[in-house]
Image (tube, coloured by chain):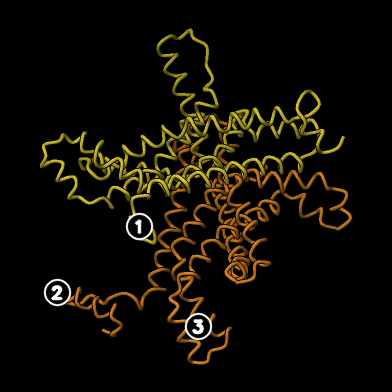
Amino acid sequence: MDWLTYLSFGDAGWGDELLQGLGVTLALALTTLPVGLLLGLLVAALVLFGARPARALALAFSTTLRGLPELLTLFIIYHGVGMGLNALLRWYNPAAGSLELSPFIAGVLALGLVFAAYSSEVWRGAWQALDGGQREAGQAMGLRRLTIFRVIELPQLLRLALPGLGNLWVNLLKDTALVSVIALSDLMRMANIAVGTTKKPFLFFLVVCLAYWLVCLLCECLLGRMERRANRGYRSGGAAA
Amino acid sequence: MMDILTRFSAQLLAGAGLTLQLTVIAALLACALALPLAIARCSERGLLRWPIRLFVSFFRGTPLLAQLFLVYYGSGQFRAELNQLGLWWFFRDPYYCALLTFVLNSTAYQVEILRGGLRAVPYGQIEAGVAMGLSRFNQYRTIILPNAYRIAFPALGNEIILLLKGSAVVSVITLFDVMGQTRRIFSQTFDLSVYLWAALLYLLMTSAFVWLWHRLELCLTRHQRVRQAPSTATSLASKRVSAGVSP
């Protein structure tokens, strides 16, 4: 069998399985993104505007999660939340059997927390770069805090945070590979299974690397366009921001 | 909870030893490799620039886990050839494979960081060096490199922390670093608290490193600091420094 046969679609090759895996990888990343973005924004808001205990808690959250390996966070969530759920279930109904936390949900939770921790720093930086006078102007016009956020702050925050968030998105895509360790059948794991059967590790892991690379390059291209669009009202050459 | 710590502290500490060892050796080797590559990357010649760009882009665009599998498991596909070359002992050992992967990965990131540092050196200073008749080598030694490293220093620190955290993936290829030991202990005891101790250990290592790096940075930038004047003239003093007058 030559290399192309291994990667062909159908029963003989692993092309369709790998593509399925890529789909799971992308689904995981795309599901995690909104969770992480919103949670990160919330943490940033708490750090900037929260009462003192809430601020301390939010800071501790982001510092801790940024200091832990993503793999460790993943295991803590996978086993910790799984055990917690089972304990809760037994307490509710002692006769209940144990249930397994799905790797996909564990992945979304763990990567979402990590993304939130990192993105809270990006959001915070963007928020601090906003001109405080605009907020005051909104208040002077009698707008509610939420309206000020929605109408005045958020559109500008998105522009300022976009480069940082784009980097985090690429990191998130790469971190999804870790979830294969807890048996989510993503691209990485599909390759592992293929290697187990075909004994062609170099071929399959190279293909996996190339797939991730391609997706990352496409995302970078897209993000560059988004940034240009977001900054279209500003002069280029450092005058933006 | 304490029970886990008293029973398994030796293993966890041994794991921390391996984690630190892998990180430090890989970071140092990558540092040595990154400098010439970064200089070549900044050079005018496209012939040198393109392969380096490709290398950097590949290692930054793929997951560390996939790179590790490519080196460790992937080399198995070429066992006969590697045996012939007398290199099989290297690729058979997960430790060397992890080290090689980390060196390549970290080099890619460090090249990118150093490139930014080299770009940010004020051109006037290099011009001044040329005017003083410094050789190309002496320009690098006395002007460009000290400046570039000072600018790149915080980013390099971040990269080493990422490497420290990323090194947890070696637990997947049967090495017993902190993560590996933790997974083994968990599979023996099913006690969640071991994860918390591991988390604490990682936080301890990263914060110790952050502290150390900050001290080093203060050391590197000591000439740029404004001496705290006893009077309220600090703002004035900083103005004078930025105007180039020694305070």
Residue at image position (30%, 45%) is A156
Q: Residue at position x 50%, y 26% from top?
A: A105
Q: CA distance from mark 2 to mark 1?
A: 39 Å
Rendered image: mark on residue A235: 1
- Looking at the colours in the rendered structure, which chain would you say is drawn in orange? B
Left or right placement of residue B224 versus residue A133 in this view: right
Q: Quadrant of residue B25?
A: bottom right
Which residue position is annotated with label 2?
B232
Type of amino acid under label 2: Thr
At which x and y percent is residue B21? 59, 57
- Residue A129 location, x and y as percent? 28, 52
Colour-to-chain, yellow: A
Q: Residue B105: x and y, percent?
A: 61, 54
Under circle 2, the secondary element is loop
Between disc 3 and disc 2, whose residue precedes? 3
* CA distance for labels 3 and 2: 35 Å
Task: Report the residue at 50% width, 87% height from top.
Answer: B130
- Frontmost residue, B4 versus A2: A2
Q: Secondary structure at mark 3?
A: helix
How many labels sit on residues? 3
Amino acid type at circle 3 is Thr
Nearer to the camera, A15 or B167: A15
Q: Which residue is mark 3?
A: B142
Q: Is residue A113 above or below residue A241?
A: above
Q: Is residue A23 left or right of residue B162?
A: right
- Given the image, on which type of amino acid does mark 1 rest? Arg
Residue at 76% in and 35% down: A195
- Residue A199 placement, left or right of B29: right
